[in-house]
Image (cartoon, helix red, strand yellow):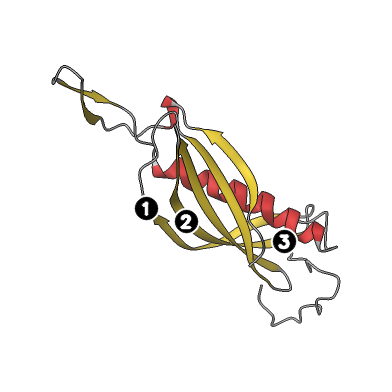
Amino acid sequence: MSEPYLALQVVMMPKDANPHPTPFLLPDGTTGTLFATIFGGVILSNIDIAGSIAARREIVLRGGQSGAQFVTVAVNRVEFKHPVLVGDVVKFLASCVRIGRTSITMHIDVVAERGNEVFSVTEAEVVYVGVRPVGADRQPVLLLPSATPPGPEASP
């Protein structure tokens, strides 16, 4: 696996929160509610964005197809470890797991900074395929120059 690359960093805002309230205890002992936990779909969307940014970077650094666009073909695994809160600074660190002829698999570690705390909140593995940027067929392209051209029966 390659060294982690900071592909994206985002401050979680109230617009990213779940619609369900989170109970909390005030210093005077009374309780209240906040819309404070981040919707998992926001995290997933940012994982996908970070993974595609890092996939392109990984291929370009290895001398591959700089003009390929990446499409998501699979999310193999996602593990939500801890909730993310409004105000957290969330970093999406990407590492290359595998490069095939037309596909690249990225591991994304999502890390939250909350005050002085820094901890992993989510992990995912996402597979992308490089495709031609133009044309209706959007055929897969070879990512690295040393890759063997795919035959008619080959898959990404």
**Left or right of residue 12: residue 57:** right
- Of tags 3 and 2, the one toward the viewer is 2
Q: CA distance from mark 2 to mark 1?
A: 8 Å
Residue 15: image tag: none
Residue type at numbered disc 2: Glu
Residue type at numbered disc 1: Lys
**Residue at which label 3 appears:** 130
**Residue at which label 1 appears:** 81
Q: Position of residue 97 (x, y in %)?
A: 62, 68
SS type, badge 2: strand
**Residue at which label 2 appears:** 123
Label 1 crowd bin: few (<14), some (14–19), many (20+), radius 10 Å: few
Residue sitting farthest toward the top: 28
Front residue (pair 86, 151) = 86
Q: CA distance from mark 3 to mark 1?
A: 30 Å
Q: Position of residue 155 (x, y in %)?
A: 66, 76
**Left or right of residue 136: residue 46:** left
